[in-house]
Amino acid sequence: MTLATPLTRADGLGSVPALLHRNATQFANAPAYREKEYGIWQSWTWSQTRDEVEALALGLMEMGINEGDFVAIIGRNRPYLYWAMMAAEMCGAVPVPLYQDANAEEMAYVMNHCGARFAIVGDQEQVDKILEVQEELPEFEQMIYLDPRGLRKYDHGAMKQYSNVQEIGRQLRDKHIKELEARQAKLDYDSTGVMLYTSGTTGKPKGVVLSNRNIIETAKSSSEFDYLRQTDEILAYLPMAWVGDFIFSVGQALWTGFCTNCPESADTMHVDLREIGPTYYFAPPRVFETQLTNVMIRMEDASRMKKWLFDTFMAHARKVGPDILDGKSVSQWDRFKYKLGEAFIYGPLKNTLGFSRVRVGYTAGEAIGPEIFDFYRSLGINLKQLYGQTEATVFITAQPDGEVRSDTVGVTCPGVELKIAENGEVFYRSPGVFVEYYKNPESTADTKDAEGWVATGDAGFIEESSGHLRIIDRAKDVGQMADGSLFAPKYVENKLKFFPNILEAVVFGNGKDECTAFINIDLTAVGNWAERNNIGYASYQELARHPQVMDTIQSHVEEVNASVAQDEMLSGCQIHRFVVLHKELDADDGELTRTRKVRRRIIEEKYDDIITALYDGSKSISTETEVTYEDGRKGSIKATLEVRDAKVMPVAQRMAAQ
């Protein structure tokens, strides 16, 4: 859209609060936010939402919030915390959502880095974490908490309950309303809308400053790309500190006026998903993989007749379902048989999964297995892939309807330009490109050039025939084997993680003669297998080293090797030796980011003895590893790990066979 001036829009919708006021007028009585609490869904209209946000903003004014202040927002997905983000910007301040499962030290770093004066938190757990590091936060002044349970005996000198702040705002409305309106009037396209911190894969997290222009232009173009509308529904369950949740639950929700639904808890998420039946849905691949694993586990326990019906109709769905979804030509008989399957299998299954009404579904963050991707599309679920980053306000590429494939991440989103550097790194520029990394001009300059091109850090290429982007790996992780062949660990790791039994994988081999790997089993999938086969185990460690589990993992590794060997460019990445780790890689132990991205350098340092064993011919390795328990205490676990050899296909033989 052409801007009326560099800083504003012709329609006046130049900020998040401006969109809120538009919706409170245009969609006054339509549902804006829902939340399930104590088993009951509560709902707020757009008009009520505006009133709730304004009351909190007025209360913050009375507490002394200044323009330019930073407000940390921490907790699970709740309407009140989304309102807190809007209220902060309404006051001219900057909301900074943090990961609710971050530990106190991680929170202290972010709050110190941005200089947060205020924190709005969900419950006692978050209060305790901030109090633990309060002495390390010289600029921090006041905390607002939402849930009062467990906080009655706390010192409330610098703490206030959320509802009390709103009540103060309502009582003192006349005192502050003109100043609040004046601050809102100053907000324009270049005002900061939110600051989101990166996951910190290779170092400390960086504060990504996103303007109202980034948020609104991205929300507008992405909503138009998928024909999102005011009557759509989403379920907000992913971390509020993640850019995807922000653009879906705040940006697109405000632009289109659709309703954002918040589950009661992580434990009830799937039940709440079925009750809401969203029309617009996003999940990382692991969620779709877990759901499919659960379906297959249940079918193992089904009667012979039910299993036959499931297998028969699912085979037909895989054959014609994606074509029917894409509007391609399918015979009348195949359509009739598919309708029977919809009545007996696909419809009930989608209802169980909560996907009966999904009109647009997305997955991103990691590659999704082709079989898993095709399974959902065969059911008639319009599941697509997108590629994005925090620095892009999410959207870089996405798959248009009718052009959905499992091996690409789609074409450029509206307003986005792409180019591929000589080393294969993907660059983009768009209206969503971030303003800067806060207090980090060096990293800003390294990532974004003077013309607005941003380095993604990913290696890939654009298909000439279709214009679709294909991502190979992280550019910094792409290397060379000792013989000069290409080393792309993520490509192999993703293939391994396509198996339900494998939760995580880390591949090594840069500069080496051979590739090796760490494997984490999926305790849910493997545990269910053990239960069905009457195999007892007392811990993750015991199950992970069970001979049959090791044999199964070895078969998966060798199947991946066979697949990798067929790719002439990456055939040198076959895995020669592997270990199944004695513990799950964990963000609390610093091995993963809060978005479950592998921190390779930390893993290489921490498990140096195991990596050495993978390369020196050892048959086993005894190791001791420090772990962090749920209550924050440190401990250690000892284990003796079996080092397994995996069958590889000699590249020379394969090429000779061709």
Image (spheres, rainbow, N blue to C red):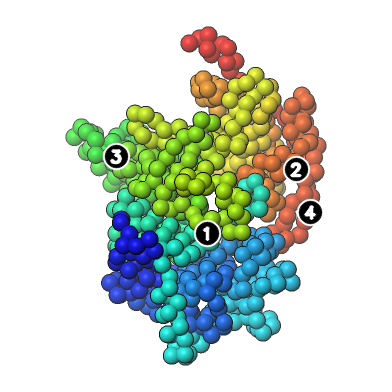
Please, what is the three-letter code of the amino acid marked with disc 2? Answer: Lys
**Residue matched to label 2:** 606
Q: Check the image and name the residue furthest to the left.
A: 332
Picture disc at residue 24: none
Instruction: Choose mark 1 or mark 4, whichever is in front.
Output: 1
Instruction: Choose mark 4 or mark 2, whichever is in front.
Output: 2
Give the SS element for disc 4. strand
* Pointer 2 local density, CA inside 10 Å: few below 14, some 14–19, many at least 20: some
**Residue matched to label 3:** 402
Residue 289, percent from left and from top: 49, 44
- The residue closer to the viewer here, 1 or 502, is 1
Q: Tags 3 and 4 in contact by the CB under 8 Å rule? A: no
**Residue matched to label 4:** 635
Q: Tags 2 and 3 in contact by the CB under 8 Å rule? A: no
Residue at left 56%, top 36%?
475
Please, what is the three-letter code of the amino acid marked with disc 1? Answer: Val
In primary-sequence order, the first of circles 2 and 1 is 1
Q: CA distance from mark 2 to mark 3?
A: 46 Å
Looking at the image, is 589 positioned above or below residue 105?
Answer: above
Residue at left 64%, top 24%?
481
In primary-sequence order, the first of circles 2 and 3 is 3
In primary-sequence order, the first of circles 4 and 2 is 2
Q: Is residue 175 left or right of residue 325?
A: right
Please, what is the three-letter code of the amino acid marked with disc 3? Answer: Gly
Q: CA distance from mark 1 to mark 4?
A: 38 Å
Residue 417, percent from left and from top: 40, 43
Q: CA distance from mark 4 to mark 2?
A: 15 Å
